[in-house]
Amino acid sequence: MPDGIGQINPARILVVDDAAEGRELLCRWLERRGYHPTASSSGAEALRLVDEGQFDLVLLDLAMPDLDGIEVLRRIRARHSSAELPVLIVTGRTGDEDVLNALLADANDFVTKPIDFPTLIQRIEVHLGRVRAEKALRRSEERFALAVAGSNDGIWDWDLEQREVWYSPRWGAQLGLSEEELGRDPATWFRRVHPEDLPRLKAALQASLDDPSRPFAVEHRVLHKDGSWRWMLARGRALARDGRTVRIAGSQTETTDRKLSDPVTGLPNRLIFREWLETAARAGRDFGLLLVNLDRFRAVNDTFGQHAGDELLARAAQKLEAAAGDADFVANLGADEFAVLADADSAVRLAERIAAAFQEPFTVDGEKLYAQASIGLALRRPEHGSGEEVLRDAQLALRRAKDEGGARIELSDPKSQADALRRLNLERELRRALDDGEITPWFQPIVRLEDGVVVGFEALARWPKPDGSMISPAEFIPVAEEAGLIDALDARILATACAEAARWPGRGSRLPYVAVNVSAKKFGDPGLLDLVDRVLAETGLDPRRLKVEITEGTIMRDPAAAERSVNELAFRQVGLAIDDFGTGYSSLAYLHRFRADTLKIDRSFVGALDKSDSGLAIVRAIIGLAASLKMRIVAEGIETRQQHRILEELGCVFGQGFLFGRPVPAAEAAAISDGGPLGSTLPRGPLPELMVP
Ligand code: C2E
Ligand code: MG
Ligand code: MG
């Protein structure tokens, strides 16, 4: 938006041009767009005005009779840098020596005559914006300097790209170091950290670097120059730019005299916990808060004495830290009450792990002691205003767990409780089913639309329930991904599907191919290629008969890693299909780079084909796109003859859907693997060549 409109301080622009007509026109234009122009007809006058007035930007004509424009620019630059006062040259002569001279004299930009006003406004805004941003930065730097000088805390600021840490003088003073001794080396800090505390500090830093929304707070000991250990609370926040963490900065507060860790367990205490909780809530992070309470702590204390009680607490803290991940935050809120802040996604599983760990006995003073845990869990929801509110929910859940007799997990709201339980059961069942080999691929034919000849099969994971019905992959794949079982599942489907395909009867290169889905989580991982190599070697399947299907979003998650996998697959002559195309948001540039040989149009578009014009338009566009990228198209989810006909008319060659065949068990697939035709009344044409590039 132009600067002036609706703003209190319109930008002041000096327009320097000896030609009255152009000058006036330009000024009127600028005024209309909300700027504050001042006209000047000569170079000498312009210099005087720049000296007197405060301008935000100058539009300078090069050709003037009295003082040459370049000379005016030089004199302006003697007083104002290009960062302070942008000068845009207005010239009718492009490409001549003047332009070069103006550049050398530090002009910010050029506008050619006749002036295109929208472009001019755009350029003006770019330069004004830059100056404004620099001013704001200077102001904030000044403010920062003031804050640092006035603060009792030390400040550190780690530039990850330069690999330098800036330490404030106060930071050095806290360790007895002079400014000269500080330097900019990260080692200045880490070398002095107590060896017992260093792993914790590093893990917390790493967690923040991995996820900048995660603030970090660690209390650790550090060696003072006088040889004593001092307790410091280091707090910080990482800063990401363009998806990369570039900087992490924070403060250091000395806590030697009011140590913030609990003396018995060594864990951060309630004070730090509160701070952590609020920071996480303010940062808008999705987290789960677990409150863990020992069920029989009072009894242990009473029966075995305070010393045994303390030891039990220390052991409990160890169990918690072992169960929690590096990135989770474990605190002791007092006595036998612990809190863990964890990722929202993993919180329920973590609660289960903790509950399981507490079912094992503790060894205290050589005796076996049982102390199970009650766990209250609250997940942060958008309606939670503060960390305090999440804490209250977790406390209510914990109370419920206690009221129900202890040794159990309760979630803060019933719906998530039910969901979580169902999911956990499913996860447990899935683990078992995988171990027992219950999940196997079924095969859905992929046909040539023209005549229904089978050219390939897609392997789809099937998990039968005891009653013979099927649990849908849509339900168990996400659970497998979350539970870390997806690799095992994909590996099993890949291996079984390839083994089956290798057995299909048929003639040489005309055998159908097999398409296997690979989870986004796995794609880009070198383990995938090892697996593919192993399976191909074990089954003897021609690599050209294997096609890996990945969904569109996968590529965008980590384009660099994905590109490596794509190239490695291509090198092995294994095919690659982009699945569910149209549902993600690929950039076309990526499609081009990723050399997938096949695009699968998502079935939602195919379903819309005979219902709406826009459905038709989208499919037509995708087919055109694939053709221009020399990719093959497979339309998914064809259910009606009408859809079949339209797709053929649009030039789509291959398809898959209930019209031609539902997924069937391996034996049935083998029976139809000699080429089809399926779902078509047309006479059977010649068998297509294998669909490999
Ligand atoms: P997908 O790869 O897009 O597979 C096509 C899905 O569309 C299959 O669903 C198939 O049964 C269904 N389908 C095929 N033709 C029709 C039709 O005409 N009408 C309708 N309404 N549906 C049709 P399914 O088997 O439920 O699989 C769902 C998704 O689960 C798959 O989508 C795939 O992304 C994933 N999946 C399946 N097996 C595996 C596997 O082994 N590993 C991984 N990572 N994902 C898998
Ligand atoms: Mg698929
Ligand atoms: Mg699909």
Image (tube, rainbow, N blue to C red):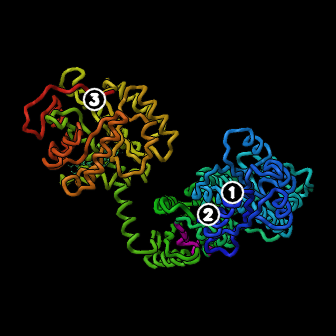
Q: Tell me which corner region of the image, top left, top right, bottom left or bottom right, holds residue 341.
A: bottom right
Distance between mark 1 and mark 2 Cα atoms: 49 Å
In the depicted view, which residue is nearer to us: 292 or 541? 541
What SS does tag 1 mark? helix
Amino acid marked by disc 2: Val
Amino acid marked by disc 1: His
What percent of the width, then of the height, locates residue 294?
A: 55, 70
Q: Tell me which corner region of the image, top left, top right, bottom left or bottom right, holds residue 251.
A: bottom right
Q: On the image, numbered disc 2 is attached to which residue?
A: 330
Can residue 515 be seen from the camera position used here?
yes
Q: On the image, numbered disc 1 is attached to which residue?
A: 127
Q: On the image, numbered disc 3 is attached to which residue?
A: 691
For the record, the magenta segment spans 288-301
Point out the frontmost of discs 1 and 2. 1
Whether residue 339 sits left or right of residue 86 in the image: it is left
What SS does tag 2 mark? strand
Amino acid marked by disc 3: Met
